[in-house]
Image (spheres, rainbow, N blue to C red):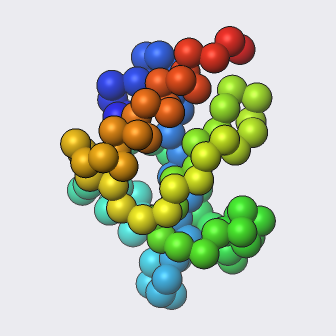
Amino acid sequence: MESRYRGKGLKVVGLHAPEFEKEKDAASVRAAARRLGISYPIVMDNDFRMWEALGNRYWPTLYLVDRKGRIRQVRSGETHEGDEDARELEEFLKSLLNEPS
């Protein structure tokens, strides 16, 4: 979805909260992002401050934030292109992108 809606106002930011000590290394995270073809920015949350501030409990969790910075929807767990959850997510995303600034 990131590539489909980038030109329509979608901004994606990853938040990396490492499970293991070795995952705290920024160079390793950059290398993994390159290997996986991830081009959006990734925030390192080594001390879990953002994780805790968001009240997060599950990985992965997706936060849809509107243009005013309000969290409008939270989805935990994996979604896969074409499944019902992904279709619902995309419809909600399109509605957010169509809201006035």
- Left or right of 88: which side holds 36? left
User: Where's residue 21, x and y in %?
Assistant: 51, 87
User: Is residue 3 visible to the viewer in this orientation of the structure?
Assistant: yes
User: Where's residue 43, x and y in %?
Assistant: 58, 56
What residue occupies the far bottom of the structure in this picture? 21
What residue occupies the far top of the structure in this picture? 100
- Nearer to the camera, 42 or 96: 96
Res 22 quadrant in image? bottom left
> Taking 18 as reference, is 21 above or below it?
below
- Nearer to the camera, 43 or 66: 66
> Quadrant where the N terminus lies?
top left
> Taking 100 as reference, is 5 above or below it?
below
Identify the residue shown where x is 30% and y is 46%: 84
Res 72 quadrant in image? top right
- Left or right of 4: which side holds 10? right
User: Where's residue 15, x and y in %?
Assistant: 55, 58
- Nearer to the camera, 70 or 37: 70
Identify the residue shown where x is 42% and y is 65%: 77
Identify the residue shown where x is 50% and y is 39%: 12
Identify the residue shown where x is 59% and y is 53%: 74
> Quadrant where the C terminus lies?
top right
- Left or right of 87: which side holds 41? right
> Taking 79 as reference, is 84 above or below it?
above
